[in-house]
Image: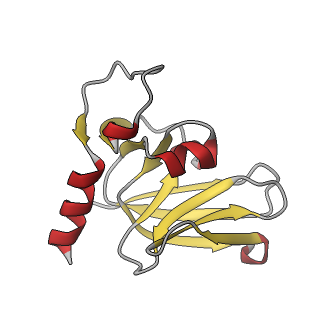
Amino acid sequence: MSITASGRCLCGAVTLELSLGNAKVGACHCNLCRTWGGGPLLALESVEAMTLHGEKHVTTYASSEWAERGFCGRCGTHLFYRLTSGEHIAVPVGLIDDGRAWCFEAEIFIDEKPAFYDFANATHQMTGAEVFAAFARQE
């Protein structure tokens, strides 16, 4: 069952249409995500397809050898994190404007999470090493 969702950046220059495999949200606590957004990235992890409108306003930044982050060049809204191989796209859940009852399920890079915050939800938690090992098994 595929879920469709849509959203937009703050200024409306970029809109997204998504096809999702489920309504699950994950949190990334890695240093890069926390630096990028000032806190953990809460993202939709089951993006099967993403269509961007207003692509001329999308700027990407290669944040590592294997991934890039996209944002609106006009207002700065974070739009996506994706592996350059195209295997994985994560979209910040806050961009989606349909009010769906999302399910907060997983946290990654839990070993990089600072001690000053915790989520109350019971989630599946993985360290950075566990995340890299899981992706290596998928290749």
Who's the residue at 82% across and 53% down the image?
Answer: 11
- Looking at the picture, how far across and down is residue 103, in whole percent? 34, 36
Q: How many marks?
A: 0
Which image quadrant is residue 90 in?
bottom left
Who's the residue at 79% across and 56% down the image?
Answer: 12
Q: List the single residue furthest toward the bottom.
A: 85
Q: Image check: 50 left or right of 112?
A: right
Compared with residue 127, is residue 57 higher up or lower down, i.e. above or below? below
Compared with residue 129, is residue 40 higher up or lower down, i.e. above or below? above
Q: Is residue 97 visible to the viewer in this orientation of the structure?
A: no
Q: Using the image as rendered, state which of residue 42 and residue 139 is in the foreground.
A: 139
Q: Using the image as rendered, state which of residue 6 and residue 74 is in the foreground.
A: 74
The C terminus sits in image quarter: bottom left
Q: Using the image as rendered, state which of residue 24 and residue 60 is in the foreground.
A: 60
Compared with residue 38, is residue 14 higher up or lower down, i.e. above or below? below
- Looking at the picture, how far across and down is residue 116, in whole percent? 48, 19
- Looking at the picture, how far across and down is residue 69, in whole percent? 58, 64
Which image quadrant is residue 107 in?
top left
Q: Image check: 54 left or right of 35?
A: right
How are the colours assigned in the image? secondary structure
- Looking at the picture, how far across and down is residue 88, in whole percent? 38, 68
Q: Using the image as rendered, state which of residue 12 and residue 115 is in the foreground.
A: 115
Who's the residue at 57% across and 56% down the image?
Answer: 6
Q: Image check: 41 left or right of 7?
A: left
Compared with residue 73, is residue 113 higher up or lower down, i.e. above or below? above
Q: Is residue 103 visible to the viewer in this orientation of the structure?
A: yes
The N terminus sits in image quarter: bottom left
